[in-house]
Image (spheres, rainbow, N blue to C red):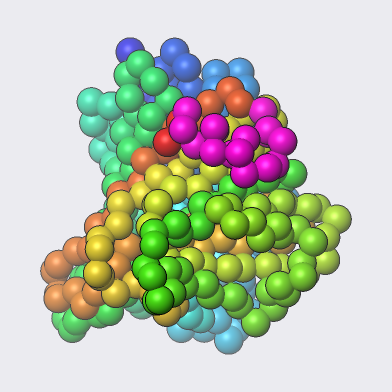
């Protein structure tokens, strides 16, 4: 049975809790929205919560176009658009969110962004008897002109975990079989990264200095994050042959001293006035401790859950 109720959650104010007998999701409704909690009932949150509001964007260069205001990461899961740009990406989303209940969850609609003229919608649906979650991300163009963008689904995950990203394995003969993007600050020798033949392993380390970000054109369309004895799996829809941002990336990941982000992207497309772009993710949560990090063990985990 799916239960939906309004709660007060930490310093996020009013939120909607969506739960079954196994897991719960908490979604902010006074700001964002953010899926700020995804956990087993009475379990630890797999999401990062920026309780201290440490990560913000409020300098005049980035926010003057919006008439001021501060953008907060808040933590949890959010909808953005790619490619990233300032000030466009950092539109402050600090206002109350419209909530429409559905049979298995709810639809969350913040106010239309006055400067960008983007309308975001986050539709969350929880399975009745499993930990499976479906999230529909929709970006609607409310401007009087076309815009070109890609829906960008960013999940900000808790400190101390380990991410597993599958590499492309298709045999393309004499041609390359994978694309990889690295941001200027990303070092190939970063000790948080292990470059395997079949998997890339990225560790979140609160003691590490500097940031790291990579992207890839994943043919497998999933990634995994181990933390607190739990395994979070993020799958996402892809479109073969479609153009993707940042040189063809449908998955990107970023880490700093606070958190790790798993980011999936929809195709980059031109959206007419009044039209929308959509992107779907599929989540699940499992009781599974981090295994020995050799590729044979990781293969077994993938076979069990993916």
Left or right: 178, with 144 as reference point: right
| Residue extending farthest front | 173
Rendered position, 269 above or below 289: below
Location of residue 87 in the rendering, given as x and y in whole percent from the top left corner:
49, 80
Tell me the residue at 31%/33% (across/down).
125
Q: Which quarter shows the N terminus?
A: top left
SS assignment for the magenta stretch, majority: helix
Residue 297 on the magenta span: yes
Nearer the observer, 295 or 106: 295
Location of residue 257 in the rendering, given as x and y in whole percent from the top left corner:
76, 58
* The quadrant where residue 81 appears: bottom left
Location of residue 31 in the rendering, given as x and y in whole percent from the top left corner:
47, 50
Residue 200 on the magenta span: no
Tell me the residue at 51%/81% (across/down).
86
Nearer the observer, 249 or 196: 196
**Res. 210 in view:** yes
Tell me the residue at 79%/61% (across/down).
191
Tell me the residue at 47%/28% (across/down).
304
The number of numbered discs placed on residues in the rendered structure image is 0
Left or right: 259, with 233 as reference point: right
Rendered position, 186 above or below 122: below
Magenta-tinted stretch: 289-304
Rendered position, 99 above or below 253: above
| Residue extending farthest bottom | 61
Left or right: 220, with 46 as reference point: left
Nearer the observer, 140 or 229: 229
* The quadrant where residue 271 appears: bottom left
């Amino acid at each position: 049975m799916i239960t939906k109720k309004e709660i007060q959650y930490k310093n996020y104010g009013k939120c909607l809790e969506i739960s079954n007998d196994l897991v719960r999701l908490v979604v902010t409704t006074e700001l964002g929205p953010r899926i700020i909690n995804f956990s087993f009932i009475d379990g630890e949150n797999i999401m990062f919560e920026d309780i201290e509001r440490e990560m913000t964007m409020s300098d005049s260069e980035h926010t003057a176009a919006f008439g001021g205001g501060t953008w907060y990461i808040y933590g949890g899961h959010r909808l953005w658009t790619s490619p990233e740009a300032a000030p466009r990406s950092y539109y402050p989303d600090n206002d109350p969110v419209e909530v429409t209940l559905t049979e298995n969850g709810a639809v969350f609609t913040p106010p239309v962004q006055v400067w960008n003229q983007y309308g975001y919608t986050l539709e969350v649906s929880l399975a009745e008897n499993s930990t499976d979650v479906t999230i529909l991300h929709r970006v609607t163009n409310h401007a009087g002109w076309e815009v070109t963008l890609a829906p960008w689904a960013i999940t900000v995950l808790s400190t101390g975990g380990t991410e597993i990203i599958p590499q492309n394995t298709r045999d393309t003969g004499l041609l390359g079989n994978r694309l990889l993007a690295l941001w200027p600050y990303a070092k190939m020798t970063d000790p948080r990264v292990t470059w395997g033949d079949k998997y890339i392993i990225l560790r979140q380390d609160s003691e590490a200095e500097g940031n790291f970000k990579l992207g890839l054109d994943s043919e497998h369309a999933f990634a995994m994050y181990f933390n607190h004895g739990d395994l979070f799996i993020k799958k996402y829809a892809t479109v073969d042959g479609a153009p993707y941002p940042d040189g063809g990336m449908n998955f990107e990941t970023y880490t700093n001293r606070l958190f790790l982000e798993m980011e999936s992207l929809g195709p980059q497309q031109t959206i007419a006035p009044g039209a929308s772009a959509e992107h779907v993710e599929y989540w699940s949560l499992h009781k599974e401790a981090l295994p020995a990090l050799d590729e044979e063990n990781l293969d077994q985990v993938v076979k069990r859950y993916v």
